[in-house]
Amino acid sequence: MTVKHVEKKELLAQVGRCMFGERLVVEREGKRFSARVQHVGVTGVKVVPETMLVEHEGEPGDINGITVSYDDIREVDIDGTIFRLA
């Protein structure tokens, strides 16, 4: 696993490449949490916090995620490379 410290512009470019299920670290309201991507949109990314996935017992795909702002994303893991905001 490789960690690359990148500027905001590069981090957002990598987030734009994300596909369903890829991992992000989000900081929101002073709390950090890891989440899995559901959908990358124009105004933000719809994610499912990993704690919700652990506690979930239903069918795949029936969890309603939350939309987070691009400004809240601190890192993204793509193919074993972690892009972390410098």
Image (spheres, rainbow, N blue to C red):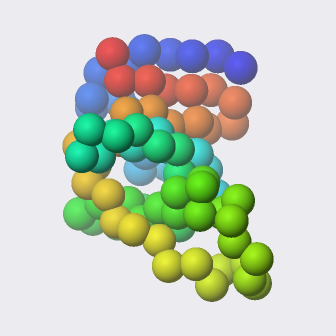
The residue located at (56%, 26%) in the rendering is: 82
Q: Eyeballing the image, is 79 above or below 3?
A: below
The answer to whether residue 29 is left or right of residue 63 is left
The residue located at (57%, 16%) in the rendering is: 3
Residue 50 in percent (x, y) is at 60, 54
Residue 6 in percent (x, y) is at 37, 19
The answer to whether residue 67 is left or right of residue 18 is left
**Image quadrant in which the C terminus is located:** top left
The residue located at (26%, 54%) in the rendering is: 69
Residue 65 in percent (x, y) is at 47, 71
**Image quadrant in which the N terminus is located:** top right
The answer to whether residue 51 is left or right of residue 84 is right
The residue located at (59%, 63%) in the rendering is: 52
State the residue in front, 83 or 64.
64
Residue 73 in percent (x, y) is at 35, 41
The answer to whether residue 51 is left or right of residue 44 is right
Residue 22 shows in this picture: yes
State the residue in front, 15 or 85.
85
Quick one: which residue is furthest to the front in this view?
55
